[in-house]
Amino acid sequence: MKTKRCPSCDGRIRIYYDHEPGDEVYCEDCQKEFQLMSLNPVILDSFDYDEELYFEEEEEY
Ligand SMILES: [Zn+2]
């Protein structure tokens, strides 16, 4: 599993390895919805931000 930092609240967005591009993922803290664009590397797109977002990536084992 990978996690990304939510750009709006700095919470965790969990990305599981069985997710596929096009899936929707959610921030655990603010429940914001993101669309998974790519798994390797993980690229997320926000539905309500126009500007490009910076997601800090963390690996978890
Ligand atoms: Zn959030």
Image: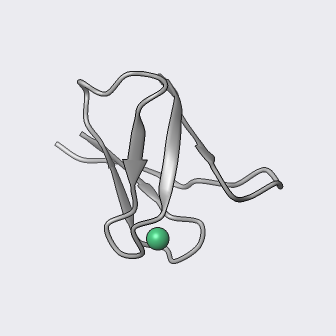
**Render colour scheme:** one colour
Q: Up-down: is 40 above or below 36?
A: above
Q: Nearer the viewer, residue 20 or 55?
A: 20
Q: Up-down: is 19 above or below 15?
A: above
Q: Nearer the viewer, residue 33 or 55?
A: 33
**Residue at left 31%, top 67%?**
28
Q: Is residue 37 visible?
A: yes
**Residue at left 49%, top 73%?**
10
Q: Position of residue 20 (x, y in %)?
A: 37, 22
**Residue at left 25%, top 27%?**
17
Q: Residue furthest left?
A: 61
Q: Position of residue 24 (x, y in %)?
A: 42, 40
Q: Quadrant of the N terminus?
A: top left
Residue 27 placement: quadrant? bottom left
**Residue at left 16%, top 42%?**
61
Q: Position of residue 49 (x, y in %)?
A: 74, 58
Q: Up-down: is 3 above or below 15?
A: below
Q: Position of residue 56 (x, y in %)?
A: 54, 55
Left or right? Give the position of 54 relative to 19. Answer: right
Q: Is residue 42 visible?
A: no
Q: Residue furthest right?
A: 51
